[in-house]
Image (tube, rainbow, N blue to C red):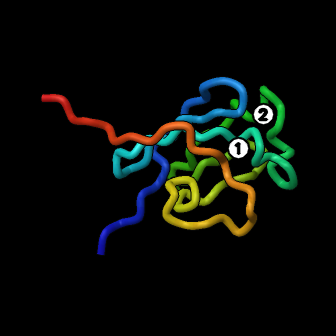
Amino acid sequence: MSRLARVKSVEHLGGRVLRLTFTDDIVRELDFRDALPGILAAVDTDEEFSSAKVDPVAGTLSWPCGIDLDPDVLRGRSTAATAIQPRVLAEYRLQQTS
């Protein structure tokens, strides 16, 4: 059985856009601008949103305020419980160099 991909790194690209690298070397640039109502409203400031980190144990995207997001949904393998999801701006696989 193959292991599910988890978030390996996160980079804030400005505004409400994050670049996530997963353990299967897929990279997704996600725009959260329209996905921040409700529980995500707590991170809808420049300072809070840019403080996103990777939880090293769970491999989730998380914020210091306690919010974390399912890496399977972020990777595109599952559907979120709510209809609101981030918009995928780019997706590519990292290439190994020799």
| Residue 30 % position (x, y) | 59, 41
Identify whether 81 is placed above or below 30.
below
| Residue 70 % position (x, y) | 60, 60
Image check: 68 left or right of 8?
A: right
The amino acid sitting under disc 2 is Glu
Count of numbered tags: 2
Label whose residue precedes the other's in the sequence (2 or 1): 2
Pointer 2: what residue? Answer: 48
**Is the C-beta separation of discs 2 and 1 under 8 Å?**
yes
The amino acid sitting under disc 1 is Trp
Q: Residue furthest top?
A: 14
| Residue 73 % position (x, y) | 57, 60
**Placement of the C terminus among the 4 image quadrants:** top left
Pointer 1: what residue? Answer: 63
Q: CA distance from mark 2 to mark 1?
A: 8 Å
Dot 2: few (<14), some (14–19), or many (≥20) neighbours within 10 Å?
some
